[in-house]
Structure formats: C-alpha cells, structure tokens
Image (cartoon, rainbow, N blue to C red):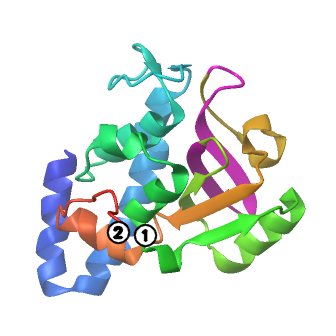
Amino acid sequence: MIKADRTYFKNLYLTNREKAIDSASKYIYSKLLNDIIPHWYGTEWDFNGHTNIPNNGEIACGYFVSTTLKHLGFNLNRYKMAQQAGLLEARMLQPKSELKMYSNESFKSLKEKLNTIYANGIYFVGLDNHVGYVLIKDRELYFLHSSYYDDKVMIELAEQSPCFDSNFYVFAEISTNRKLIASWILNERLNVPSN
C-alpha cells in the first residue's frame, strides 16, 4: 500500500512539487502516528533488541526508530541507522546546519523553545543515551520510544518520562521536513553521514 501511495505522490511531484510535498507530509505524519507506531506499543525493550515484527521479540530504542521509518517506506538500512549515536541518526534525516541542539535546558525552557520554532508534527530526538520521536501536538510534547525504564515501546508525556531527562538534545524534523519528504517521494537513499 505504501508503495502505491508513493507512486501517487511521485506522479503528483512531477506536475506540482509543492502540492505533492504538502500532501505527502500529512500522509507521513498520519501513517507513522496512526498506522505504524501503534502496532509497536507494548513491544518489549532490550538493549540489543532488533525485531522487525511488532510485539514479536524485543527492540532497542534506535531500532524502534529505524524500523518504523523503514516500514513507512524510507529507503535506509535500519541496522546501520540504529547503531549510530543520536546526532548521526538525526543527520541522516536533516543536514547538521538545520538540526536544533540544546544542552542543559530545563524541560520548561526546552518546551518553550520547541514550540517557538516547530509546528505540530513528528520529530526525531536524540538524547544523551537514548533516541525516539517527539510528537508536538497543540503545544504539548509527547515522547514515543522504546523505553529502557518501562521495558516496552510506549507513548507518554515527555515531561513525565524519566527517559526524556537528558543533558543534550538534538532534534530533526520528520513530518515538517520538506527535503526529507521529497526524498521519501523519490525513494532516495538515506545514508549515515561520513563526516
């Protein structure tokens, strides 16, 4: 189904690039949030987990992100992506100059900054020793991740998540990232940055 949907967006892209990216952005947001990630809720966490099937085996935080992106149709090696530090994973999705990085921020300050620069959408987040997604919806931050604290894939308010506490945060846009959406439409390969 995703392959057929991508063909639709690719044909639209050839005639109306802006409309194709706008429509595909909404599609990616909805598909990831409502159709792909929910199947993973409750899947057991393990530091070395790398299952490709929701609720069948275990999954680490990096593999949760890379596998769900792969299932969404992004052209990437889920193993190579998952084995990177959060900053490199973020750079697979967005150029370093466009990433948002914060150090030693209170949650309140971080939330205010994110709501100033980002719209409702799904974002990748890399932390000191963890990765996941942040959903910004109506100015609230939700953390979607394979939790080493609760030992499962879950969604929770970021403010209440022990796993969201970090000295360092790096954010990459996903559903609002026009270059990434175009890469998805065109099935371009996302590679680990070499420098």
Spot occupied by residue 24 in the image (x, y as percentages of width and height) = 32, 67
Q: Residue at x 67, y 79 (%)?
A: 117
The tag earlier along the polypeptide, 2 or 1, is 1
Classify the position of the N terminus by image quarter: top left
Question: To which residue does mark 2 refer?
Answer: 180
In magenta stretch: residue 146:
yes
Depth check, front residue: 29 or 62: 62
Spot occupied by residue 191 in the image (x, y as percentages of width and height) = 28, 58
Can residue 52 be seen by looking at this rendering? Answer: yes
Can residue 157 be seen by looking at this rendering? Answer: no
Look at label 2 and name its amino acid: Leu
Residues in magenta, as a range: 131-151
- Residue at the limit of the structure toward the front, as seen here: 195
Q: Residue at x 84, y 63 (%)?
A: 105
- In the drawing, what numbered circle is on residue 94? 1
Q: State if disc 1 and disc 2 touch (CB < 8 Å).
A: yes
Spot occupied by residue 186 in the image (x, y as percentages of width and height) = 17, 67
Spot occupied by residue 74 in the image (x, y as percentages of width and height) = 27, 53
Q: In which quarter of the image is residue 162?
A: top right
Q: How many labels does the image show?
A: 2
Above or below, comparing residue 110 to residue 152 in the picture? below
Q: How far apart are labels 2 and 1 at the CA level?
A: 7 Å
Chief secondary structure of the magenta portion: strand
Q: How crowded is mark 2: few (under 14 residues within 10 Å), some or many (20 or more)?
A: many
Q: Residues within 10 Å of mark 1 (few under 14, many from 20)?
A: many
- Residue at the limit of the structure toward the top, as seen here: 57
Classify the position of the C terminus by image quarter: bottom left
Q: Residue at x 63, y 74 (%)?
A: 118
